[in-house]
């Protein structure tokens, strides 16, 4: 199969028929073999009935329905596990992503040698206050912190080689950082393509203000797990030793002043409490690293590494 199109959706019954017909037309014009995976993320409207009707008319359209709303990351991760196409393309169900971009995205993966190609909505039709300006701030911060230079990390229109989606796991709200996750899993050929952004035709946006809080926290989680997930002692142990040594040095200076310089009592100095606090925090951090290391060493995936090729 050439292409798997993964479309997570929530209450998009009006847009699905037009979207699937549009995708089918593009596939037929380019002689692609394909499947469309519609992941219903707990819709409360008639989206699932529409998916069933679409499947009855076209066997290439397949559906997966969640019992409740688990979020876009869960929908994408399920689609990634199910996809059978050589190239996997994700897009939103609201008709703001154009299926006409699919042939060029496919070519960039198959002929251009990219592992992942992310869309860039250079011209947007969103509210500048609600989405446009925050997106620019978010994308700039993500690029600086992760080293993955993209203009639009959160664009729903992306293309992947199949082995990329089979080697990464998306959970929580990590769908915003799929290029970052892919890079830290060894897929470094990440490209970008300017794509058309269309005005929403049906329904309402699922955007929420919690993105401003959850987004940075998720990015920090990814960075931490990627760097220290298999060696937590390297972080917690180092910080713990530095704090403990600082506190021990303070205690040593105060003890010297007490016994050899006839200074007043150690406990009357605020510095004494800073030293004590440093030693306590240092010990706690060291023990945290020690316990995290034990958990990591006993994890069934402690020696799970991505292998690009094998020779027998």
Image (tube, rainbow, N blue to C red):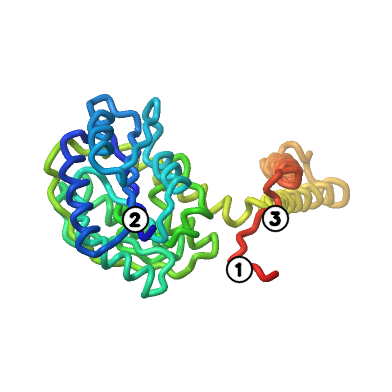
Q: Secondary structure at mark 2?
A: strand
Q: Which residue is mark 1?
A: 309
Q: Going from the N terminus, do you reach mark 3 or mark 1 first?
A: 3
Q: Quadrant of the C terminus?
A: bottom right
Instruction: From the top left corner, tell me how far across and down residue 29 is, in percent.
Output: 19, 62
Which one is in front in this view, the residue at disc 3 or the one at disc 1?
Answer: 1
Q: Secondary structure at mark 1?
A: loop
Q: Going from the N terminus, do you reach mark 2 or mark 1 first?
A: 2
Instruction: From the top left corner, tell me how far across and down residue 167 is, in percent.
Output: 53, 55
Asked which quadrant contains residue 77, the reply is top left
Q: Find out whether the residues at labels 2 and 3 contact each other: C-beta distance under 8 Å.
A: no
Instruction: From the top left corner, tell me how far across and down residue 248 is, in percent.
Output: 78, 49
Q: Which residue is mark 3?
A: 234
Residue 113 higher or lower than 289, as above or below: below
Q: Which residue is mark 2?
A: 89
Q: Is residue 107 visible?
A: yes
Q: Nearer the viewer, residue 125 or 210?
A: 125
| C-alpha distance separating marks 2 and 3 | 38 Å
Q: Going from the N terminus, do you reach mark 2 or mark 3 first?
A: 2
């Amino acid at each position: 199969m050439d292409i798997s199109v993964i479309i997570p959706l929530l209450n998009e019954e009006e847009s699905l028929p037009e979207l699937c017909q549009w995708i089918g037309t593009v596939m037929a014009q380019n002689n692609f073999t394909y499947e469309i995976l519609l992941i219903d993320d707990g819709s409360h409207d008639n989206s699932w009935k529409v998916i069933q009707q679409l499947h009855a008319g076209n066997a290439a359209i397949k559906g997966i329905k969640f019992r409740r709303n688990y979020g876009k990351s869960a929908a994408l991760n399920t689609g990634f596990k199910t996809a059978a196409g050589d190239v996997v393309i994700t897009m939103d169900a609201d008709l703001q992503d154009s299926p006409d971009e699919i042939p060029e995205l496919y070519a960039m993966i198959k002929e251009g040698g990219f592992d992942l190609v992310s869309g860039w909505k250079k011209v947007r039709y969103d509210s500048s206050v609600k989405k446009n300006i925050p997106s620019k701030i978010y994308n700039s911060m993500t690029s600086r912190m992760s080293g993955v230079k993209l203009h639009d990390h959160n664009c729903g229109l992306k293309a992947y080689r199949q082995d990329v989606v089979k080697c990464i796991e998306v959970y929580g709200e990590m769908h915003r950082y799929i290029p970052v996750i892919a890079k830290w899993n060894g897929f470094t050929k990440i490209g970008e393509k300017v794509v058309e952004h269309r005005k929403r035709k049906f329904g309402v946006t699922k955007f929420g203000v919690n993105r401003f809080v959850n987004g940075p926290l998720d990015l920090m989680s990814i960075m931490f797990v990627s760097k220290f997930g298999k060696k937590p002692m390297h972080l917690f142990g180092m910080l713990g030793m530095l704090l403990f040594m600082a506190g021990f040095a303070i205690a040593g200076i105060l003890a010297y002043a007490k016994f050899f310089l006839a200074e007043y009592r150690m406990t009357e100095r605020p510095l004494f409490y800073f030293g004590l606090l440093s030693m306590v925090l240092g010990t706690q951090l060291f023990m945290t690293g020690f316990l995290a290391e034990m958990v990591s060493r006993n994890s069934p995936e402690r020696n799970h590494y991505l292998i690009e090729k094998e020779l027998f």
